Amino acid sequence: MGNQDRREELLYIALELFATKGYHQTKVSDIVKQAGVAQGTFYWHFKSKEEIALEIVEKGKENLLDAVHQGYRQQFGSTQDMIESSSNFMKKIFYFAKENKSLMIFLLIKGLGADLLIRNAIVGTFTSIENAFKQNIDRAIALGMLETSNMVDLKANMLTSLVIGTITKWLFGPSFDVDHTPTLSVEEVTREMVQFEFFGLYGQKEGTYDNH
């Protein structure tokens, strides 16, 4: 196995352990034992457990932002076009969350007990997501698809809270059970999300929009 493959394996194993055991309960010895390597191999790639955790958070942020930055308002279109684009956009986020459940567990639940530097990195991840939502709203205003507003920051904050809160309850249930199986499909939850999000931003009720 090459050095890069080994590094990726250590990142994967560390994330799984952080998600299942928690950051403080996971030791470097746990990571190397599961990887079947010596501790020296771990320290060849990472200076500490904190460093590998910070890299996990950073990579997770980059991947989440890749989905968000694809955006759903690239050019002017009809209201129905906007709804369909929003649906596709939200599906990407929810599929990402479902396919990267360990990362979401670490960011949303298990990382809460981590050291301050790691907690700050996690907070920074969600701040970056909020800024990306703000850029999407600003783009929609510039295209004339949403009315000019002096509440863009607040709307981005509300939208981020809505998305993150829904992902958390959908993936982990009301009791934050990591083994919780969502009862709604990605399609079902994103459909309801888009109706709630879109018509709230657009300022219209479902059934009152036009299709030109």
Image: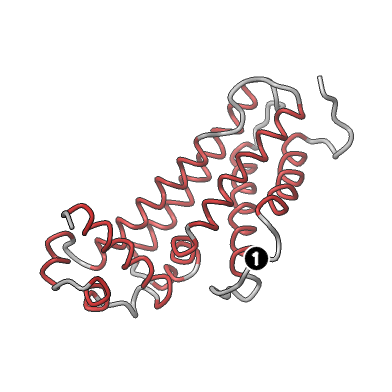
| Farthest right residue in view | 208
| Mark 1, secondary structure of its residue | loop
In the figure, 87 relative to 105: above or below?
A: above
Answer left or right for 69 relative to 78: left
* Residue where numbered disc 1 is placed: 182
The residue closer to the viewer here, 21 or 33, is 33
The residue closer to the viewer here, 172 or 205, is 172
| Farthest bottom residue in view | 25
Task: Tell me the quarter of the picture where residue 179 sits.
Answer: bottom right
In the figure, 72 relative to 61: above or below?
A: above
At 50% from the left and 36% from the top, the residue drawn is 69
Q: Position of residue 163 (x, y in %)?
A: 62, 52
Task: Tell me the quarter of the picture where residue 15 sits.
Answer: bottom left
Q: Can you say which quadrant of the picture contains the N terminus? A: bottom left
Task: Tell me the quarter of the picture where residue 51 sits.
Answer: bottom left
At 72% from the left and 38% from the top, the residue drawn is 201
At 48% from the left and 66% from the top, the residue drawn is 105
Crowd tier of the residue under label 1, counting other residues whose Cα lies within 10 Å: few below 14, some 14–19, many 20 or above: some
Total marks shown come to: 1
In the figure, 199 relative to 76: above or below?
A: below
Task: Name the image colouring.
Answer: secondary structure
Q: Can you say which quadrant of the picture contains the C terminus? A: top right
Answer left or right for 156 relative to 127: right
Q: Position of residue 20 (x, y in %)?
A: 43, 75
| Farthest front residue in view | 1
Amino acid carrying mark 1 in the image: Pro
At 37% from the left and 56% from the top, the residue drawn is 57
In the figure, 185 relative to 205: above or below?
A: below
Answer left or right for 38 relative to 160: left
Q: Position of residue 178 (x, y in %)?
A: 54, 73
